[in-house]
Amino acid sequence: MLARLLPPPGPKRSGPLLAALLTVTAFCASDVVARSYPFGPRTRSVNDLGNQYLPFHTHLWDLLHGRADGGVLFNWQSGFGASFLPDLATYVSSPFALLVGVFPRDRIDLAVYVITVLKLACAAAAMARLLPSLRPGRWWAAGLLGASYALCGWSVSSATYNLMWLDGLIALPLLCLAGEWALAGRHRFLGIGIVAAAWTANFYTAYMATLAAGLVLLLRLWLSGLPRGQGLAAAGRACLTTALGMGLAAPLVTVVYFGSAHASPGRFTGFTPVPTRDLLARLLPTTYNFGSPALFVGTTALLLALALPFVRSAPPRVRAGWPLLVAVVTLSLQWGPTQLLWHAFAAPQGSSYRQTFVVCALLVIAAWHALSYGPPDRRALSAAGALLALTAAVASRSDLVRPLAWPVLLLAAAGALGGLFLLGRTGTRRRSLPAVCAVVLLLGTQVGEATATAAVATRLRLGHMDDYAPWGQRRQQQAEAVAEADGWPRYRTDPGREQTVGNDPLTVGGQGAQYYSSHTSDVLFRTLTALGGGWTSGGRSLQSLDNAVTDAIFSVGARVHSPPDPHQNWFPQDGSGVTVTRQEVPPLVTVRPTAARPSAFGPSPYRNQELLLGTRVYTVPRLTVRTGDGRAPRGAGGDRPGVRLDALPEGPVTGLPTITARCAAGSEVYLWTPHFAGTARLAGAPAGAPTGRFRSDPVSKIAAMQRLGTVPASGLVRVDLSPNRPSTVPDGAVGCLDTGRLRTAVERLTATGATEVSVSGGTIRARLPEGSTGTAVVAAPRIAGWRCATGDASAVPAGQYHGLIAIPLDGTSTRLTCVFHPPGLRLGTAVGGMSMLAVALLGVLTAVRRRRGTGPASEDGLYKRA
């Protein structure tokens, strides 16, 4: 398809090639300057790139090489079992993602970097291909502006570590090109293919790009002056192309929609527009901020866009239409209702300006129109320079403009104005020395300021976002430990509580509770939270729960223990290495008696664990909490009952806050403080006893329950706390586990549970003891899509046992089968099939019309009229 999009050999082909070359040069040079991976020691795996996207690309590698637990439809490694097709469609459905398969598994970081560079180059080439289709112009100018689009502020500051969004950066110019073909009545099927590819690669940014392409087409129709009938026909062709292309992508789009509908709701903050000074500041080079729209497109493109209203050689409609569209779309970034419209009516978690690349594209298109009518004259350049100076003056009041911005801006403005002035002096002598100097100056200016802007963004991201080391010795040891202990599906192997990234099971193997995705199911979130689990990212990133009872409930027979990640500095490090502990656990499928009136989860995670286990195993003692000076802390109100503790002051302290209680000697002590941040240690514990490390904040994180050690012979439990921020200790924070009772409960569940369990993709098969009655419970979250059957009966939607899959037993059947079907897949497949049929019928009709000589009007004829 890409070969068909490129023009035939000659000057028209040179523009996309130049754009790609400039983009790759500037982007790689920025990483050299920033000393970022793979050109330096600084990691580039910040935020969700390290937590989500690299792990999902690693899982794709495993799928391609037949090493994953599960398949395309279901992922057994994350969240104790999760639907994978929504994740695939959200994170790794781009054709570029398949390139990970040719790299070694321990070089996924490099594979993702190469994919990022290739996407940027393709986006530059696509824009350079689009611009001459809108209006003829110089090939080097198309290359220059194509690179300015691909290296816009949104790309280098936001999208390069959210690499799925780069598919939208490629899609926007291609969708505009498909709109041009619809306008001309040409390449109908190629246009449908482009829409389908865009929505398949990343539906989220494709939605934004489709809205933007629609706005561009409407403006093009207005500028063309076509009669109403021809304009409506062109719009109808564009709508049909879009509908059929989206229909072909429906099998993935629908599963993403239903996956989002069943996902954890997350914790979202309301939209607040940024001040005008910050908005204008992001037009300048080397400015950076996570929460503002990165509008930088390069000083040359910005000057040309500002000059367009003053280019007297351009028609009045062109001089007014493109600047007006840029202004309207820019203002839509700042208004709540249009913000929701751009984000498909779902408030984004994180950056509120994910549609910024649309404004960057429109600025570049406006710049192209300004230059396509010839170099702007002195009047236009003077006006543009004055507007740029005014923009810089307003932006100077913003904290986003750092000292480095001014020398870079002055050099870029001098280079852009000098190059455009020289270009205007050359007249028609395109190969004269001044023309060559002008082009070299403009290209050098673009590469220089884009390099500086990208390098600054790379460095500043590391300063305020979590970052993660690339694959190294730690993860290699974890992967080896998991592989050695793995016994799936006889039991699960959890890669450990001390996580490296939010999706450790996808990178180092195993089948744990950890899971970080936009599609983390609400039922899993609620179940693990009720059991004392921790989470970050507003409930979308669930953590492993190192607890003997939950390990028994979820059949975790082996658990990896690692020291805290040395790349992080959240807590003090210890010198222990990677170890594995094992315990006897029930099988994946157990049998429980049917309760007449099932109890619901309550406020205590200890009692909730007992509810799922079916046996009392904890003592939850009365607590006495004291501050470091021995006083009783003040109570905490609202939805967090308990007491409040202040953060410890810096420097030496005379005493630590303590929790005291009494339990049976020899029982295991657990501490549940979801809104505590800091460390906790059992007083008098021997060397090597675990230290509880808790991370929480008021909005996006809660801490998981942790084991602190064994109750001493005196029966006195004293926990020393070291809070590093204001925290809450809830009622019933301490639980003391009777390991003997737990062992008895495990033996009972094992004796009555499945004698044989097999797992293949999204299918579970189990053989139960003769005469089993009650309820069969599968140790997996009951997410939407599970259907189960016993014996030869027909499959029905699975029931739920406190968040797990449940199937009633009749005492006669000994075979149980559960099959997972992703919600929305049947609907999407039906829509996709109908769309494919419609495309085939359209092809037949087109062939018949051509044979009869009544095909659509030629492109040349339509554009002469326009």
Image: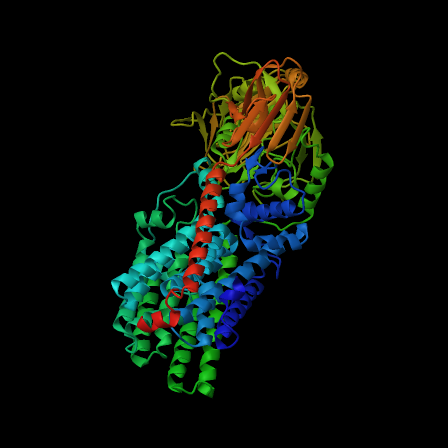
- Give the image location of residue 329, x and y in percent: 32, 58
In this rendering, the answer to whether 521 lies above or below 790 is below
* In front of the other: 697 or 535: 535
Q: Name the residue at 47% across, 19% down.
A: 600
The quarter holding residue 704 reads top right
- Give the image location of residue 200, x and y in percent: 49, 50
The quarter holding residue 115 reads bottom right
* In front of the other: 347 or 65: 65
Which residue reaches farthest right? 484
In this rendering, the answer to whether 549 lies above or below 199 is above
- Give the image location of residue 376, x and y in percent: 34, 78
Q: Is residue 101 visible in the rendered structure shown here?
A: yes
- Give the image location of residue 279, x and y in percent: 35, 58
Q: Name the residue at 44% across, 41% down.
A: 257
* In front of the other: 828 or 629: 828
Q: Is residue 208 visible in the rendered structure shown here?
A: no
* In front of the other: 586 or 629: 586
The quarter holding residue 610 reads top right
